[in-house]
Image (cartoon, helix red, strand yellow):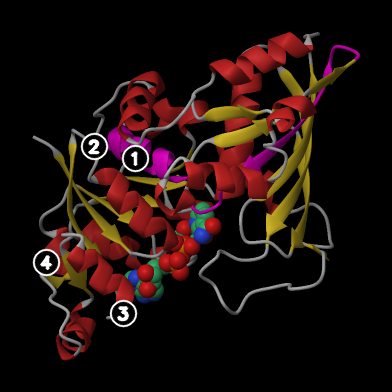
Amino acid sequence: ARIRVAVNGFGTIGKRVAEAISKQPDMELAGVVKTKPDYVAKYAVSSGIPLYAPSDRLDAFREKGIPVEGSLEDLLEKVDVVVDATPGGVGKEYKHVYERFGVKAIFQGGEKPEVAEVSFNTFCNYEEALGKKSVRVVSCNTTGLLRSICALSKIAKIKKVRATIVRRASDPKEVKRGPVNAIVPNPAKLPSHHAVDVKTVLPSLDIATTAVVVPTTLMHVHIVFAELEEEVTRDDVVSALEQTPRILLADAGLGLASTADLVEYARDLGRKRYDIPELVVWLDSVAVLGGREVIWMQAVHQESIVVPENIDAIRAVMEAAKSAEETIRITDRTLGLMS
Ligand code: NAD
């Protein structure tokens, strides 16, 4: 039988994860939950996605003439797993509801790590999530860092990582966030929380991060330094990245020289919502100094990078794929990811 999945919260992450679920041969999207009867709710209905709402919101949908199938509780009765994609910090409020219905839960990076039994990235700790009741897919920046760090750790033991995160100010749909004309240390007091978040998945890694927010909406960029225990060549690093699924090497010489170029390429490819769930590493930026110091720059499409990991997390909690390789194969083929 296919895994029946609900998505609570149909915003930036929820709508993408819901559509990704409906493309999986072993999953069925039972429905999504929205709180507001708005154009996004209309979009869900017109796309044939069964729409549900919290019980105290059902009347609001009916007043706007938007058909709903029932309440959140009605939906939870029907599913094996719920993907919680409510705003950061809201997921923990639903934890006991999911537990009451005996439904496994996938939470997002905006929640505190304690919300779930394990914080997760497919490339670093897939097996740890097998059969768990709850899993937290770490944030977009942390997912990006973990993909390349775990790819690099296949060729040499990592002594330490230092990274600077250049963060986008807002997602394209957000109207109230900034800055519009400043570069803001985020936070000014070091270190940034990204290193702490990486350590929820790789507890023994020596990592420190700094971050600034800049006025852009398209993607984040990371500048990463890693010190290795063993000597490697630049070719070793490039081939490790090349061989890792969900990592693309961008050639600045071909004009893929900025986040704007990457997004334009995604638009030319006809990718829905110009999504780039792959981590993009600039090939030209990869450098090895003295054999043990590796430097690279990478770009993270914040709205979509966690989508494949959410799909893998569903398979992990249901033990529907025994290894990372197995789930990656299915997820990446069905989502049309490049590698
Ligand atoms: P969002 O605001 O775009 O979407 C949240 C959705 O939840 C909306 O549909 C909203 O109407 C709904 N909602 C609000 N309150 C609710 C409630 N009480 N009950 C049920 N639904 C409610 O948020 P998002 O950007 O999709 O973020 C969701 C989670 O994903 C957060 O934990 C966030 O940190 C994480 N995340 C976001 C990004 C990103 O760049 N946007 C990237 C990675 C992870």
Q: Are marks 1 and 2 in contact (CB under 8 Å)?
A: yes
Query: In the rendered structure, which disc, 1 or 2, sits on the residue that comes first in sequence?
Result: 2
| Residue positioned 36% across, 20% down in the render | 323
Gap between marks 3 and 2 measured at Cα: 27 Å
- Residue labelled with disc 4: 74
Q: Are marks 3 and 1 in contact (CB under 8 Å)?
A: no
Query: In the rendered structure, which disc, 3 or 1, sits on the residue that comes first in sequence?
Result: 3
Which residue is at the front of the view, 181 or 8?
181
| 1 or 2: mark nearer the eye | 2
User: Does the beta carbon at disc 3 come under 8 Å from ligand 1?
Assistant: no
- Residue labelled with disc 2: 24
The answer to whether 231 appears left or right of 308 in the picture is: right
The answer to whether 271 appears left or right of 53 in the picture is: right
Q: Are marks 3 and 2 in contact (CB under 8 Å)?
A: no
* Quadrant in which residue 15 is drawn: bottom left
Q: Is residue 209 visible?
A: yes
Amino acid under disc 2: Gln
Residue range corresponding to the magenta coloring: 290-317
Residue 248: x and y in percent read 57, 29
Amino acid under disc 3: Asp
Residue 21: x and y in percent read 26, 45
Q: Quadrant of the N terminus?
A: top left
Is 295 magenta? The answer is yes
Image height check: is 72 above or below 144? below
Name the element at disc 4: helix
Residue 38's tag is 3
| Residue positioned 43% across, 54% down in the render | 273
Query: In the rendered structure, which disc, 1 or 4, sits on the residue that comes first in sequence?
Result: 4
Query: In the rendered structure, which disc, 3 or 4, sits on the residue that comes first in sequence?
Result: 3
| 1 or 4: mark nearer the eye | 1
